[in-house]
Image (spheres, grey):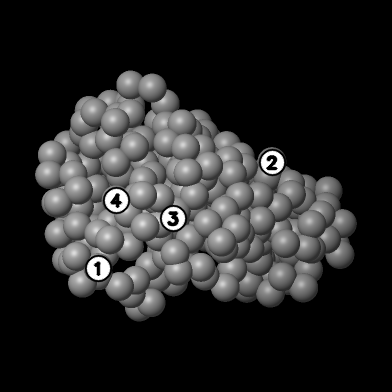
Amino acid sequence: MGELETLKSLLERHGLKPDKSLGQHYLISSRVINSIVLSVAEGASVLEVGPGPGVLSQPLFERALPMKAIEIDPISVAVLGERMPELEVIRQDALKADFTEIACSLPEPRWLVSNMPYHITGPLLTLFTQHRRLFLGQTLMMQKEVAQKIMATPGEREMGSISVYLQSRFQVSHRVFAPSGTFFPPPKVDSQVLLFIPSNALSDLREDAWHEKIVRAGFIQPRKTLANNLGTLLGKNEGVELINSLGLAPSIRPHQVTLETWFEIAKQSGKLNES
């Protein structure tokens, strides 16, 4: 029996249909599944967020011990219980759970894996980033359009606050593409899997928070100048003075700024904010 037929049989037995409100699209491509599973470092424990019926969970469990999963859908939890009775599944909303406690119940090194529902990709990325130091790495699947924005480089129009925010906190790399046909039911968009390895930058929590605040302000109106955007947070004159002090062109737009310059902007504006 093929992967899709096996999955359909499980779903039918439990009366489970993919729930659009939960953004459920089940991965059925062995190529993509294998790529995700092999991205996990050998010897790492695994926390999977949103396993659904366990398409990824089973091969992950065979590679990584111990392993835990967080799943909100009760029927998916029932399917997992039949398919993998030895897997500890925490029936909670990952966005409301005590994520630190759950992660720390696994031994180090830890790895995070998630096929993120499209409608909560942003909140999950924020959650996973805030807890990045608990994991050796993260393998995350998302809508291809979001992945391309995350990986955009300075000068590209796609570069936005999410690009700077995540690239400043991780080494981000492409893992594998997952076209719509690799899912059941097929969504209207393609997906992409990215690998996130935490960087050593922004280890201080206050610096981390201020950097995020500055970046968000810098992109508040992406088509306007960086000085104008920063002025909304720092004050108009202060925004202009900061850009001048860093030797940047008055006309520079936020998508043209390098990661290193964003660090410097945050550093210098922090001093300005303290004075």
Which amino acid type is shown beneath numbered disc 1?
A: Glu
Which amino acid type is shown beneath numbered disc 3?
A: Leu
The circle on residue 27 is: 3
Horizontal and vertical percent for residue 216? 57, 64
**Outermost front residue:** 1
N-terminal of the two: label 3 or label 2? Answer: 3
Looking at the rendered structure, the secondary structure element under dot 2 is: helix
- Circle 1 residue: 12
Looking at the rendered structure, the secondary structure element under dot 1 is: helix
Image depth: mark 1 or mark 2 in front? 1
Image depth: mark 1 or mark 3 in front? 1
Evaluate whether residue 193 shows in this view.
yes
Horizontal side of 239 relative to 147 (left or right) equals right
- Among the 4 quarters of the image, the one containing residue 252: bottom right
The residue that appears at 45% across and 69% down in the rendered structure is: 185
N-terminal of the two: label 1 or label 3? Answer: 1
* Disc 1 from disc 2: Cα separation: 52 Å
Which amino acid type is shown beneath numbered disc 4?
A: Gly
- Circle 4 residue: 54
- Circle 2 residue: 260
The residue that appears at 26% across and 64% down in the rendered structure is: 11
